[in-house]
Amino acid sequence: MMKVAVSAKGTTLDAVVDPLFGRAENFVVVETDTMTCRSVANENKARSGGAGIQSAQMLAHAGARVVLTGNCGPNAHRTLQAAGIDVVVGCTGTVGEIIERFKAGDLRSASAPNVESHAGMSGRRGR
C-alpha cells in the first residue's frame, strides 16, 4: 500500500492535474492498491511566500510517499526530498490517469526542480 499525492484542480480521481505544486487548489491522496482517495484542500495556495515548503510539509504529515505534479520549484523539491518523498513532474491529464501511469511504471522521479522559485505566483492572485 502506497499513498501518492497528486496536485489537482478538483477533489476526485476525475479531477485535472494542477500544473502548480505549492499553489495547487487541492491534493488528491490516493492509496495505489485500492484506488481509494481523499482530498486535502491546499490552505497554502494563497500564502505570500513559502507555499511550496508548507505544501510539502503538509503532504509529509499526510503520509504521502510520492508526489505527482506538473511543476515543482527548488524549495518544495528540497523539502519533499528531505521528507523522503519522491517527486514526479510533467504530469498532465486526470488524477486517475496519472495514477495509472505511475502504477504502470511509466513515470520517473525528478532529481531536480523543473521551475524557478516562486514560479506559480504570477497570474494566480485573485482567482
Image (tube, rainbow, N blue to C red):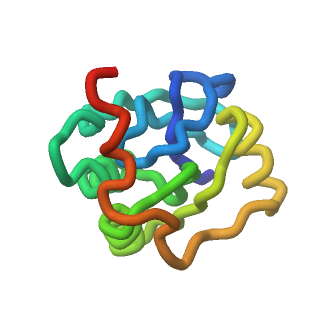
Up-down relation of residue 29 to residue 21 (above or below): above
Q: Quadrant of residue 23?
A: top left
State left or right for residue 59 relative to residue 113. Answer: left
Please provide percent x and percent y for residue 109: 62, 69
Up-down relation of residue 68 to residue 123 (above or below): below
Q: Quadrant of the C terminus?
A: top left
Name, please, the residue furthest toward the left: 48
State left or right for residue 93 relative to residue 8. Answer: right
State left or right for residue 72 relative to residue 15. Answer: left
Is residue 119 something one can see in this rendering?
yes
Q: Quadrant of residue 33?
A: top right
State left or right for residue 105 relative to residue 46. Answer: right
- 121, 35: nearer the viewer: 121
| Numbered marks: total | 0
Please provide percent x and percent y for residue 36: 62, 31
What residue lies at 33% left-to-right and 42% top-to-bottom?
Answer: 122
Please provide percent x and percent y for residue 9: 51, 27
- 74, 37: nearer the viewer: 74
Please provide percent x and percent y for residue 16: 63, 29
What residue lies at 20% left-to-right and 53% top-to-bottom?
Answer: 50
Q: Quadrant of residue 121?
A: top left
What residue lies at 41% left-to-right and 51% top-to-bottom?
Answer: 63
Name, please, the residue furthest toward the bottom: 111
What residue lies at 57% left-to-right and 50% top-to-bottom?
Answer: 70
Is residue 61 something one can see in this rendering?
no
